[in-house]
Image (cartoon, coloured by chain):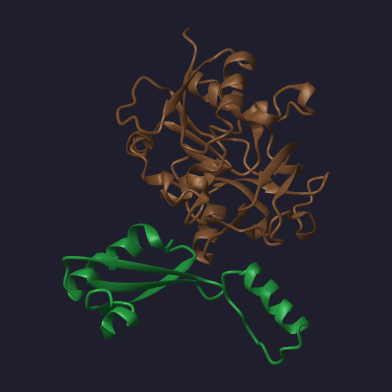
Amino acid sequence: MVKVRVLVTLKPGVLDPQGKTVRNALESLGFKGLTDLRIGKVMEIKMDGVSPEEARAQVEEMCQKLLANPVIEDYRYEVEEASAERKPAAQRDR
Amino acid sequence: MRTMRFGIVLFPGSNCEMDCQHVLREVLGQEADLLWHKEEKVSGYDAMVLPGGFSYGDYLRTGAIARFSPIMKAVEAFAAGGGLVLGICNGFQILCEANLLPGALMRNRNLHFICKQVPIRVENGRTAFTNAFQSGQVLRLPINHNEGCFYADLATLRQINEKGQVLFRYCGGKGEASEAYNPNGSLENIAGIMNEAGNVMGMMPHPERACEQILGSEEGRGIFSSIIRRWKGEG
């Protein structure tokens, strides 16, 4: 199985009113020195029957076609080969 | 002469299609059919309307999923052949996602859902969608959106200004398109644009909700009558 984590972020210069509001809230909680806070999206995808290389090519296409809007967003992704789901500790020990 | 035939696309989550149909049929006396988004073959229409609403629950980004609905291939082919396409609110968002219009619509700057009547200024009164108006004329139309903040990069912005593609700007009652009258943070107060070819238009305000005096304004009617005039070769 391949695990993919896609990060979609707003391009530099694109206004992020949500990020600004959250930053203001953190400042009102007393956190100091925050110069910027921007909100993006994380998408976690699991894929079966593909190599990490194939997954990478597919995810690139997914990002271009749907997951990000190139007018306002940038994207990047991490691909990781994961062995079958780990069993809960209690079962493993038996 | 026969009446004009409008096709109104109904996506899952559209909610302004009946208003559009009512205006086109009852107020303007034209034909208007609702077309389910799963239809792949669409023919015999003189213009297409993508109405407002929340297609696919606005998931991922507004309009991002709807643009891949089966009917959109037909809409794209219709537009490529010069057919007139009008996108209102969510329809505008879908047209941007589909690259039929430049730019993108983002979360309102103040993070509020905005529902109110606002003045907008007609920037170009010589198009298929605005020929019933004068350039500079101020209309009062309702807006009703959460993601109406128009954004485009500087090169695109310059191009749509130079080519007369900006059709409407938010303004004050006297037509002052200044920051004080920008409800949602749209760049340069942009409320509606068309493509370079001049046959695809998107706008955030809802003209279909302002076509009868009982609803407070008739000033949206000119959008639809402009399309009809253009089709008849009069405007």
Q: Is residue B75 above or below residue A15?
A: above
Residue at the outermost right position: B174
x%, y% of residue B97?
Answer: 44, 51
Picture coordinates of residue B106, whole percent (x, y) = 58, 58
Residue B195: tell me if it is visible: no
Q: Residue at x 47, y 45 (%)?
A: B56
Residue B100 placement (x, y as % from top left):
42, 46
Relative to A80, B107 lies left or right: right
Which chain's colour is green? A
Left or right: B24 with respect to B97? right
Residue B165 vs B135, above or below: the answer is below
B177 over B70 or under it: above or below: below
Determine if residue B210 is in view: yes
* Quarter assignment of residue A42: bottom left
Q: Nearer the viewer, residue A52 or A60?
A: A52
Quarter occupied by residue A82: bottom left
Q: How many marks?
A: 0
Q: Colour of chain B?
A: brown
Question: Which residue, as the protein is rendered here, is positioned at the far bottom?
Answer: A33
Residue under the point 58% across and 25% down: B18
Specify the farthest residue to the top: B1
Assign the C terminus of chain B to one quadrant of the image: top right
Residue lying at the far front of the rendered structure: A94
Where is residue B119? Give x, y as percent: 76, 42
A19 or B157: nearer the viewer: A19
Q: Vertically, is B7 above or below A50?
A: above
Does residue B201 appear left or right of residue A2 in this picture? right
Quarter of the image for residue A51 reads bottom left
